[in-house]
């Protein structure tokens, strides 16, 4: 009888341990999504898109200040830098020669939360932090383009770090990647994918955010929308993961107008996700569309709709949570490369 009791106790203990391990990845992400707030987004963007950063043009002192701001943010949260090749782990340094000396040396910013079970598989969440700089003594602050995406990535990183501290570590590693040189021709992401710090073969998806703080003319009467581009181009499974995340948690009106292959704007080819898609890495590009202040000095902080920015950022977080914690990576069922 004592032997039977002992066996039962061991079995119950093993079951309890297993249940605890499973809960690590079944934890409700809503708890952590609540940390993504309009107030925080406003605070971060008010710094990043201020005149102090002089429009963040690639290779300029303003861009260097923005790089320092982002590096300090990740360091303050104790989120590790992603480049351990030298003593500047948050910076992937890009020499001016890569740009054919058209502008100065620049940097991608990279940070990582390592996965617990599949640390060598990666979900990349990205946005470009550069903008157009100064022209005729006017500063192009780029609050929406792409200050909004940049601070969105920051808030997503903070949410994942809160989960990590609570013991809810992601299965896969999550890379937070801020690109320079997007406005010069997607050059920061081009450099990263040609000189990857982490295996592209093991990169399961790229969620790229470029302008999510405003609304376009077509949605003046309804801001509860977001354009998604590329979600089904390479992986129908990624598209369904995104749809499910939206239906479960956010309920935005997802607009696929610009995902059409005959879209005359060719937005699929015009932001940093495309340099991942070229390697058959499933991608989603999150975008609010263009507006009257696009690429003008009037793209400023006070015009951002922070309630929309918060809700859209949460969609990216929920999608990333699922990608980081599901058992299998999304299948590429529509590859473009010959294997």
Image (cartoon, rainbow, N blue to C red):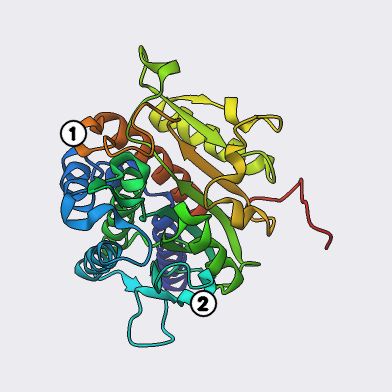
Question: Neighbour class for label 1 at 10 Å: few (<14), some, many (≥20)?
Answer: few
For mark 1, give the secondary structure. helix
Residue labelled with disc 1: 302
Find residue 316 and name its label. none
Residue 233 occupies which quadrant of the picture? top right
Sequence-wise, the earlier of marks 2 and 1 is 2
Q: Position of residue 338 (x, y in %)?
A: 84, 59
Residue labelled with disc 2: 97
Give 207 or 315, whichever is nearer the viewer: 207
Q: Are marks 2 and 1 in contact (CB under 8 Å)?
A: no
User: Residue 92, can we see it?
Assistant: yes
Q: In this view, which residue lies farthest toward the right?
A: 338
Labels 2, 1: front one: 2
Question: Neighbour class for label 2 at 10 Å: few (<14), some, many (≥20)?
Answer: few
User: Residue 328, can we see it?
Assistant: no
Q: Position of residue 297 (x, y in %)?
A: 28, 39
Give 300 or 321, whichever is nearer the viewer: 300
For mark 2, give the secondary structure. helix
- Which residue is depicted at the point 58% across and 30% down? 258
Residue 304 occupies which quadrant of the picture? top left
Q: Which quadrant of the figure contains the N terminus?
A: bottom left
| Vertical placement of residue 143 versus 323, above or below | above
Q: Position of residue 94 (x, y in %)?
A: 45, 74
| Horizontal arrangement in the rendering, residue 299 relative to residue 228 (left or right) | left
| Vertical placement of residue 334 versus 191, above or below | above
| Vertical placement of residue 163 versus 231, above or below | below
| Horizontal arrangement in the rendering, residue 308 relative to residue 179 (left or right) | left
Q: Which quadrant of the figure contains the C terminus?
A: bottom right
Q: In this view, which residue lies farthest toward the bottom?
A: 86
- Which residue is depicted at the point 21% across and 38% down? 301
């Amino acid at each position: 009888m004592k032997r039977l009791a002992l066996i039962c106790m061991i079995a119950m203990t093993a079951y309890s341990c297993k249940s605890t391990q499973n809960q690590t990845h079944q934890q409700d992400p809503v708890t952590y999504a609540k940390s993504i707030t309009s107030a925080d987004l406003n605070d971060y963007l008010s710094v990043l898109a201020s005149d102090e950063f002089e429009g963040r043009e690639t290779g300029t002192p303003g861009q260097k200040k923005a790089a320092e701001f982002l590096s300090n943010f990740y360091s303050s949260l104790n989120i590790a830098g992603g480049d351990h090749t030298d003593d500047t782990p948050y910076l992937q340094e890009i020499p001016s020669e890569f740009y054919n000396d058209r502008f100065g040396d620049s940097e991608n910013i990279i940070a990582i939360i390592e996965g617990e079970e599949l640390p060598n598989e990666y979900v990349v969440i990205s946005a470009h932090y550069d903008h157009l700089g100064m022209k005729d003594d006017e500063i192009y602050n780029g609050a929406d383009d792409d200050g909004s995406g940049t601070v969105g990535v920051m808030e997503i990183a903070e949410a994942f770090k809160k989960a990590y501290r609570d013991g809810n570590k992601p299965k896969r590693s999550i890379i937070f990647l801020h690109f320079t040189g997007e406005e010069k021709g997607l050059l920061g992401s081009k450099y990263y994918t040609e000189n990857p710090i982490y295996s592209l073969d093991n990169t399961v998806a790229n969620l790229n955010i470029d302008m999510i703080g405003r609304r376009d003319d077509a949605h003046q009467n309804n801001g509860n929308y977001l354009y998604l581009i590329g979600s089904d181009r390479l992986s129908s499974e990624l598209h369904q993961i995104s749809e499910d995340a939206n239906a479960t948690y956010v309920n935005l009106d997802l607009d696929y107008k610009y995902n059409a292959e005959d879209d005359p704007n060719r937005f699929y080819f015009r932001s940093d996700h495309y340099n991942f898609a070229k390697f058959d890495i499933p991608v989603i590009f999150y975008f609010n569309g263009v507006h009257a202040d696009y690429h003008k000095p009037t793209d400023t902080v006070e015009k951002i709709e922070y309630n929309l920015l918060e809700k859209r950022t949460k969609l990216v977080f929920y999608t990333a949570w699922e990608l980081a914690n599901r058992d299998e990576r999304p299948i590429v069922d529509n590859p473009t490369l010959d294997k």
